[in-house]
Structure formats: structure tokens, C-alpha cells
């Protein structure tokens, strides 16, 4: 016997209608949950993927719905979000720039205020103090003398006459250019002036090199009313090219400041150990001794200003001997020009040696500036 099941068309329609209703309900529920997916922590794509697997016929409906949602909701949201983020980035960047500018302004103001405080606190050197040269192991040598000023002539062909030594000069005394051909030259370190060495008694830290000495002289000379340019450019990063580099730098500065006749190239003595520290005691202070080095045309290079350079150095040292005997060692005259052909009042001033401390050299600037203020009138 064969059993046959008879399915009426009406039952099939009812069955399909139930499936359709179920599909509609599932779709609506899917939309509902997708709108609140952040609250219930369910990702729409994961949920719909489950439905796609469970009910294959709904896959196309979900795909079309995703396209509609992407076009109608997601892209405008992304655009709006990107615009908002862009605005926020711009505001943040502007705020950072404003903060940096404000910090820079505050730093500049602090530096100006500190410089004003430093200048107000500058103590002018007294005169009439007891002066005593502290003995060292380097003997004093010289070949000529004018009114107590000693000169050591190291040239091969120049013979100094009395007329060459008379300190009569005709130069602009008001404007001064201070620079450093050997900017990295430094001194024996102390607690207040420690530095990272870039060589034997050398550092690129201009707060601990001869550049710091130049800064001190600049402050004092401005205090006395002079116009001072202080060039702290590091010219000796290549030591063999340092004079070529400083020549270009100083020549450019003189083009911009045509009325400048006085050039002080501040160095320190090149002896490379701490055993030599030429010092003079003035009152209760230890002060590094100084020395003029004057170039000439003795080496054959054109240098019309050398004798005037020498006369000015003699004039300054003559006054120094009067106020603070022993502050200067004998002047050295050499064949090399040392870029002193650039002006009528140019010289090298060696301040102390490797054995001296920065404190002693800064003291030197107090007494040198006093001497200069008496001479450059």
C-alpha cells in the first residue's frame, strides 16, 4: 500500500506568507539593532553575516540595504567627521604655534630683563688698587720699549724706530667690533664653567669659550656708552681655515658698519696645558694677564694699517700700565697679518692661557674696559 500526502495550494500560500512575514520582521529587527549597535556593542556586519548564513535568501536584501545605508548615512557622517577633525587639527596647531610664540616672547623678555639686570649690576673697576704680578714659569722677553710699554719684535725685516712707536692715532673711537677667529678656545674648567670639550681646551659652547669673554667686554663697553658689535660666529670648526672664514665674516660686518675702526679679535694663549696661567692680582681679585698680538706686512702681504694698529695697542697698554701695572704682557709684533689689514685700530687680544679660569678672564674684562674707557675718548 502506498501512502500519499496531499498538500493543498492554500497551505503552501500560508506557509510562504509566514516566511515573508518572518523575513520582514528580521529585516526590521536588523535595522533596529543596527541603529543602536554602539549601545548594545554588536557590530552590524557580524549580525547580518549570521542572518546571511542562516537565511540565504536574505543576503541580497542585506547587501542592498548596506549600499543604501552607506550612501545615505555613512559617507555624510565620514565627511562631517573629517571636516570636524580637520578643524580640530587646525585649532590645535594654531594653539601650539601661539604657545610656542608666547614661550619665545617670554624667553626673549627674560633674556632682555636679565641683560638689563646684568648691566645694572656691572661693577666698574676701581683705580689706585695695589697690583702684583703672580710669578709664572714663562720669562718675559722684549726687544723694544716705549714709555714703559714693552714690544717683542718677531718680524724678520721690520726695524722699529721711535717714530713708529709714538702712540698718535686718528681713528673713530666710538664704534667697536669684537669677534673671535678661534671661537672655541677655552680655559681650565671650574664648577661654574663646565663644558663638553671639542678638543684640547676647546669647546663649541660659547658660554664657556673666549666668546663668553667677548660678551663680558661688550657689556662693559656698552655700559661706558660705546657702540659695540659682538660676533660670536664659530670660525674655527676647521682650524686651518679659521682666518679665511673670519676675514669674510668681519669684512661683511664692516660693510654694514662703515664707521667702525676698532676691531678686537679676542683669543687666549695657545699653550696647551694647565701649567701656564699668567695672572695679576689687582686688589683682592685674581685677573688673567692679557697680551696684544699685532700683525704686519713683514711677510710680504699688503697691510697699510699695521703701524696704526701698533700705535693704538701701545696707547692702550700705556694707560693700562698707569692704572694696573702688569695687566698686559709685552706686545708681540709678527709678520702675519691676522686680518688686521681691515681697519686702522685692529688687534688680537690674548686673554689668559689654558691654565686660567673663566672667572679670572671675566675679571680681566672689567679692568680692560676701564682702561679702554679712558683711552677711547
Image (spheres, rainbow, N blue to C red):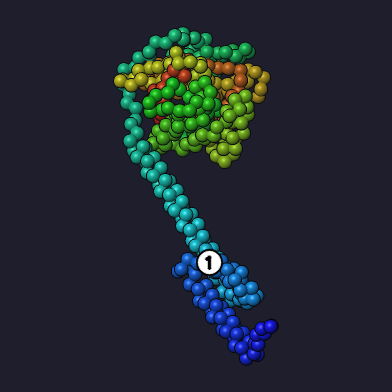
Q: Position of residue 187 (x, y in %)?
A: 45, 22
- Please tell me which residue lies in front, 5 or 55: 5
In the image, what residue occupies the spot 40% across and 33% down?
220
**Which quadrant of the structure image shows residue 14?**
bottom right
Q: Position of residue 128 (x, y in %)?
A: 31, 21
In which quadrant will I find the N terminus?
A: bottom right
In the image, what residue occupies the spot 35% across and 14% down?
132
Please tell me whether residue 274 is drawn above or below residue 185 in the rendered image: above
Residue 305 shown left or right of residue 323 in the figure: right
**Which quadrant of the structure image shows residue 66?**
bottom right
- Please tell me which residue lies in front, 147 or 109: 109
In the image, what residue occupies the spot 39% across and 44% down?
110
Residue 42 shown left or right of residue 337 in the figure: left
Residue 280 shown left or right of residue 69 in the figure: left
**Which quadrant of the structure image shows residue 134?**
top left
Give the residue at mark 1. 43
Residue 226 shown left or right of residue 60 in the figure: left
In the image, what residue occupies the spot 52% across and 72% down?
34
Disc 1 secondary structure class: loop
Whether residue 195 is visible to the viewer of this picture, yes or no, is: yes
Q: Position of residue 81 (x, y in %)?
A: 53, 67
- Judge the density around disc 1: few (<14), some (14-19), many (≥20) Cα neighbours within 10 Å: few
Whether residue 147 is visible to the viewer of this picture, yes or no, is: no
Amino acid at each position: 500500500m502506498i501512502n500519499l500526502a496531499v498538500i493543498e495550494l492554500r497551505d503552501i500560500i500560508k506557509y510562504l506568507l509566514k516566511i515573508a512575514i518572518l523575513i520582514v520582521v528580521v529585516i526590521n529587527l536588523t535595522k533596529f539593532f543596527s541603529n543602536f549597535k554602539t549601545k548594545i556593542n554588536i557590530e552590524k556586519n557580524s549580525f547580518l553575516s549570521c542572518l546571511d548564513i542562516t537565511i540565504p535568501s536574505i543576503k541580497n536584501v542585506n547587501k542592498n540595504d548596506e549600499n543604501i545605508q552607506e550612501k545615505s548615512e555613512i559617507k555624510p557622517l565620514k565627511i562631517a567627521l573629517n571636516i570636524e577633525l580637520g578643524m580640530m587639527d587646525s585649532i590645535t596647531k594654531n594653539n601650539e604655534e601661539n604657545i610656542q610664540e608666547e614661550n619665545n616672547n617670554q624667553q626673549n623678555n627674560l633674556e632682555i630683563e636679565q641683560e638689563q639686570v646684568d648691566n645694572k649690576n656691572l661693577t666698574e673697576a676701581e683705580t689706585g688698587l695695589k697690583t702684583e704680578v703672580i710669578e709664572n714659569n714663562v720669562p718675559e722677553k722684549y726687544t723694544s720699549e716705549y714709555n714703559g710699554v714693552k714690544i717683542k719684535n718677531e718680524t724678520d725685516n721690520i726695524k722699529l724706530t721711535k717714530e713708529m712707536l709714538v702712540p698718535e692715532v686718528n681713528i673713530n673711537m666710538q664704534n667697536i667690533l669684537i669677534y673671535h677667529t678661534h671661537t672655541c678656545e677655552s680655559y681650565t674648567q671650574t664648577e661654574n664653567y663646565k663644558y663638553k670639550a671639542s678638543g684640547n681646551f676647546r669647546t663649541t659652547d660659547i658660554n664657556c669659550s673666549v666668546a663668553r669673554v667677548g660678551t663680558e667686554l661688550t657689556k662693559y663697553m656698552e655700559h661706558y656708552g660705546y657702540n659695540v658689535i659682538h660676533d660670536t660666529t664659530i670660525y674655527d670648526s676647521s682650524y686651518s681655515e679659521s682666518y679665511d672664514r673670519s676675514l669674510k665674516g668681519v669684512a661683511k660686518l664692516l660693510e654694514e658698519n662703515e664707521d667702525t675702526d676698532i676691531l678686537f679679535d679676542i683669543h687666549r694663549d695657545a699653550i696647551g696645558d694647565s701649567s701656564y696661567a699668567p695672572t695679576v692680582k689687582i686688589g683682592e681679585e685674581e685677573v688673567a694677564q692679557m697680551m696684544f698680538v699685532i700683525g704686519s706686512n713683514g711677510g710680504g702681504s699688503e697691510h697699510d694699517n699695521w703701524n696704526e694698529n701698533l700705535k693704538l695697542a701701545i696707547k692702550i697698554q700705556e694707560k693700562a700700565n698707569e692704572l694696573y701695572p702688569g695687566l698686559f704682557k709685552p706686545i708681540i709684533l709678527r709678520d702675519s697679518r691676522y686680518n688686521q689689514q681691515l681697519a686702522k685700530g685692529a688687534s688680537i687680544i690674548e686673554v689668559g692661557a689654558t691654565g686660567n679660569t673663566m672667572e679670572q678672564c671675566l675679571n680681566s674684562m672689567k679692568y680692560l674696559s676701564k682702561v679702554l674707557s679712558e683711552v677711547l675718548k
